[in-house]
Amino acid sequence: MKQSKSKKDRKTSAWFQRHSNDPHVKQAQKEGKRSRAVFKLTEILDSSQIFIKKDAVIVDLGCAPGSWSEELTNYIDGNGKIIGIDLLPLSPIRGVTLIQADFDTPEGQQALIEALDGRKVDLVVSDMAPEMSGHKLVDQMRMIGLNEMTLHFAKQYLSPGGAVLMKTFMGEGYDTFRQEMGKTFKRIKNIKPTASRKTSPEFFLLGLDMKVWSES
Ligand SMILES: C[S@@+](CC[C@H](N)C(=O)[O-])C[C@H]1O[C@@H](n2cnc3c(N)ncnc32)[C@H](O)[C@@H]1O
């Protein structure tokens, strides 16, 4: 007997339909990119004032499947360094040190610090998002939690003048967090790249030109 589709099945097939019709998914497949997320990064890099030096040290938080890290390798030379961390495993990327760990744990952060090998960071990028529970407030608070961890890490390891780019959601806790960012960076921008789906609550916060401690 044919069974009617469950709500979960209907949601999944709607997602597949949207995904396969998405022009950025098609473009990513055509260009051999690991994810459509790469177009969010390229748009932000093209339109913002992030300047990446050839010998930059870049940390990519929530890097799987690796399209941002792979893209960033085009900006640096052999004196630069890219370190990516994710909960998930991912296939190797030439020129990128990959760590499979939870950034939100002392072990994950320790692994990152060891990979830095004493170098200061010029740019932190984070495309991390919490696993969505479906409960708006819970997801929002988890997102802001990841943002706070990212800012805390940036304050400790960014070099003066460094930058951070992180995904966030508008909602509870956002205003307070943005004020915190303002104490650390001279310039802050909110960016919603066109590759970011209109239906998604995500956008990106860019903090430029980290203040030295005496300025904050
Ligand atoms: C949207 S994907 C990133 C896509 C990536 N920027 C790219 O271009 O391929 C978000 C990633 O964040 C990771 N993530 C979420 N929370 C994390 C955490 N606490 N530590 C490490 N990775 C995390 C997820 O596993 C997921 O792979």
Image (spheres, rainbow, N blue to C red):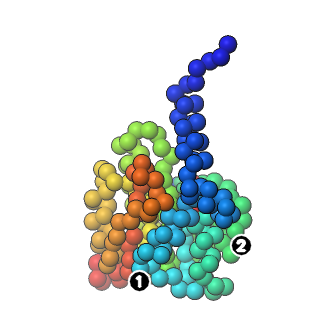
Q: Residues within 10 Å of mark 2 (few under 14, many from 20)?
A: few
Horizontally, residue 202 falls left or right of residue 8, namely left
Total number of numbered labels? 2
Q: In which quarter of the image is residue 100?
A: bottom right
Q: In this view of the protein, which residue sits in the foreground, 31 or 82?
A: 31
Task: Indicate yes or no: mark 1 CB to ligand 1 under 8 Å.
Answer: no
Quadrant for the N terminus in the image: top right
Q: Which of marks 2 and 1 is in front?
A: 2
Q: In which quarter of the image is residue 87?
A: bottom right
Q: In this view of the protein, which residue sits in the foreground, 170 or 40?
A: 40
Horizontally, residue 52 falls left or right of residue 140, namely right
Question: In what element is the residue under mark 2?
Answer: loop
Is residue 54 visible to the viewer in this orientation of the structure?
yes
Residue 160 bears which disc, if any? 1
- Type of amino acid under label 1: Pro
Q: Which of marks 2 and 1 is nearer the N terminus?
A: 2
Q: Kindly identify the residue that appears in the image at 42 percent across and 76 percent down.
A: 48
